[in-house]
Image (tube, rainbow, N blue to C red):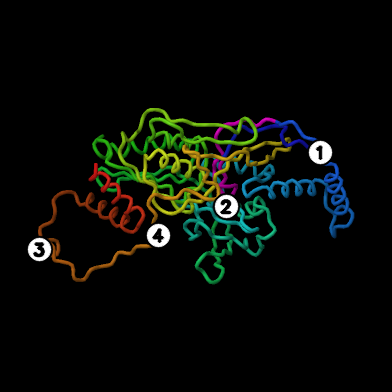
Amino acid sequence: MSFLRKTLPVLTAGAVFGVMLSIGGMVWAEKEPQSSLPLDDLRAFSEVFGQIKASYVEEISDHDLLENAIKGMLTGLDPHSTYLDKKAFKDLQEGTRGEFGGLGIEVGMEDGFVKVITPIDDTPAFKAGVEAGDLVIRLDEKPVKGMTLSDAVKIMRGKPGTDIVLTIIRDGETRPLKISITRDIIKVVSVKNRMLEPGYGYVRIASFQTRTGANLLEAISALKKETDNAELKGLVLDLRNNPGGLLNAAVSVSDAFLTDGLIVYTEGRIEHSKMSFKATPEDVLKGAPIVVLVNGGSASASEIVAGALQDHKRAVIMGQQSFGKGSVQTILQNNKGGAVKLTTARYFTPSGRSIQAEGITPDVSLLKVKLERLDDDFSSVKEKDLSKHLANPSGSEEAKKAKKEQVALSNDYPLNEALNLLKGINILR
């Protein structure tokens, strides 16, 4: 059976094949000349195949045996190479359009268990409290140990409105946690934006999809309109818990802030896995300072952006060590309607760094903390506290909105620190 009969022209820089599936880029993989076949190993395979057919406790079809053999072949390579049957391949294609059914988590395999790379913003898993780094050991009552990643994904996907219970192990917890999640149609909003304070903008990229680069430019344009079309004083680019996605989208986002030089390059064994991407002249922020927020859930395409901006000293990277996925996958479609997702290259930052299994080290490291606002019973008395004080005639809605944004900002420690850093950079400038 030839699995290079038909090759789909896609290349992924996404986190991993999971409940949300992401592909991207553009590459054609060629069929390489085959070396001589290892006859002794093939005889051993044939012998085991015959033993299973003859002696296994239940009758099993040749198709199932061969498909399981293919899955095992890929599982033994690395956590990101996998076999996609017809349905899984269809799910992958749906995932790249930013709308699909499921829980809303990016997952991979670690020590035979499903590892949560990150929950996606505003999805059932995110709202239920699933966290990056969680290890899923049971799906409902089914143990995960022994499953392939695609088998686990099939169980997690399902009809919207139905429930599933994830039993997870989490660092810092003394016993497994059970989290019930209701499946839903997942609609991923790639880019969100808002003003933090006058002149200081915030852009959150949740994943890298086809239109993420264009959406980023639209978001920055909207922020500038809020400042009467003046240039921004600084921008916080939030890539926390962003599992990655399309390679071309990561290049577009990086290019928006760089004026020249290399963004990223890839190296692999086949010719078409060797690519490089360079920046074009215009910087959409005209040199205004940038702080990029990352954490352990920032993976792959997120790390491409953070690495490019860090190497070019275009931004300050703040937060925690990123996930560390520095490999590229190519989708090779087969003649059965399925596909092989195969690791074909490593990517490198402009300075030649591979972040594989290491991640991006922030310029400014922050501990994982949670802030709470404390009421000060002994604060000084202000005009608004005086009896029968005059009301403020200027629109109270703006004041309420500003107060709400300040509360949200103060509850997000890394974001608050990023804004303070931007202000400090502007003072020094």
- Cα–Cα span, label 1 and label 3: 92 Å
Do tag 3 and tag 2 residues touch (Cβ < 8 Å)?
no
How far from the left and from the top, in percent, is residue 175?
Answer: 55, 71
Which element type, helix, strand or loop, lies under badge 3?
loop
Rate crowding at label 3 as few (under 14), some (14 to 19) or many (20 or more) other CA atoms within 10 Å: few
Do tag 4 and tag 1 residues touch (Cβ < 8 Å)?
no
Magenta stretch, main secondary structure class: loop
Inspect the image, locate mark 1, and give the three-letter code of the amino acid beneath it.
Leu
Which element type, helix, strand or loop, lies under badge 4?
loop
The reply to whether the magenta stretch includes residue 342 is no
Do tag 1 and tag 3 residues touch (Cβ < 8 Å)?
no
Query: Residue at label 2?
Result: 107
- Cα–Cα span, label 1 and label 2: 35 Å
Residue 37, disc:
1
Reading the chain from its start, which is encountered first: label 1 or label 3? 1
* Vertical arrangement, residue 34 with respect to residue 135, above or below: above
Inspect the image, locate mark 4, and give the three-letter code of the amino acid beneath it.
Leu
* Vertical arrangement, residue 416 with respect to residue 215, above or below: below
Reading the chain from its start, which is encountered first: label 4 or label 3? 4
How far from the left and from the top, in percent, is residue 250?
Answer: 47, 38
Inspect the image, locate mark 2, and give the three-letter code of the amino acid beneath it.
Val
Query: Residue at label 4?
Result: 367
Q: Residue at x 39, y 54 (%)?
A: 365
Do tag 4 and tag 3 residues touch (Cβ < 8 Å)?
no
- Cα–Cα span, label 3 and label 2: 58 Å
Do tag 1 and tag 2 residues touch (Cβ < 8 Å)?
no
Q: Residue at x 25, y 44 (%)?
A: 426
- Cα–Cα span, label 4 and label 1: 53 Å
